[in-house]
Amino acid sequence: STESDETENQMVVKEKRRTVLREAVSQEHADEYIISTFRGIADGHVKQKKYSEALQVLDDVLKVQQMKVGGIHQSIGTTLHEMGVVHQHIGDIDKSLQAFQQAVWMKTKTLGKNHTEVA
């Protein structure tokens, strides 16, 4: 049936995405280009109102970033901000606010409180 085929296809795509990200981490190729590409995929999901898929992609990106750069980095702040936007679209204000607060903290910590992305 079409619905089960679609679900199966979504699972295949999700697994391929995770495989690419895992390989990028293991081969130390998870640079900003790869991360930017996956952020673009998440943005595409948002534009299609596929918010859970967008959050899955952003969660994978966040995990890769944390593995590559540790716990504190400006790019992690950007990903947290994007997650906050998606939670806002869903209507989950608590998770949205939490993600935005984490993003501001991360950006302040890495860029300084007077940087344009923070102020």
Image (cartoon, grey):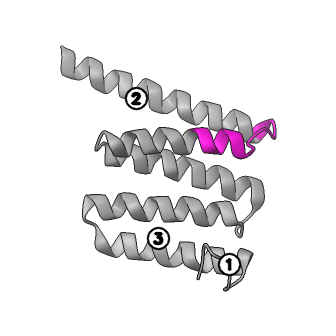
| Amino acid tagged 1 | His
Tell which of 8 and 83 is nearer to you: 83
Residue 43 position in % (x across, y down)? 44, 45
State which quadrant residue 78 falls in.
bottom right
State the residue position of label 2. Answer: 11
Mark 3–mark 1 distance (CA, rounded to whole Å): 19 Å
Q: Are marks 2 and 3 in contact (CB under 8 Å)?
A: no
Residue under numbered circle 1: 115
Q: Earlier in the sequence, mark 3 or mark 1?
A: 3
Q: Residues within 10 Å of mark 1 (few under 14, many from 20)?
A: few
- Badge 2 or badge 1: first in the primary sequence: 2
| Crowd tier of the residue under label 2, counting other residues whose Cα lies within 10 Å: few below 14, some 14–19, many 20 or above | few
| Residue type, numbered disc 2 | Met
Task: Tell me where the magenta segment starts and ends, as one range.
Answer: 26-37
Numbered label attached to residue 5: none
Whether label 3 touches label 1, CB < 8 Å: no
Q: Is the residue 118 above or below the residue 57 in the image?
A: below
**Given the image, on which type of amino acid does mark 3 rest?**
Ala
Residue positioned 66% across, 38% down in the render: 22
Which quarter shows the N terminus? Answer: top left
* Vertical relation: 22 (above or below) 81: above
Residue 85 percent coordinates (x, y): 40, 62
Which mark is nearer the camera, 2 or 3?
A: 3
**Label 2, label 3: how far apart the Cα atoms are:** 26 Å
Query: Looking at the picture, how far across and down is residue 119, in whole percent?
Result: 58, 83
Residue name at image x 20 percent, y 22 percent: 3
Assign a secondary structure to mark 2: helix
Q: Earlier in the sequence, mark 2 or mark 3?
A: 2
- The residue beneath circle 3 is 99
Task: Using the image as rendered, state which of residue 17 and residue 75 is in the foreground.
Answer: 75
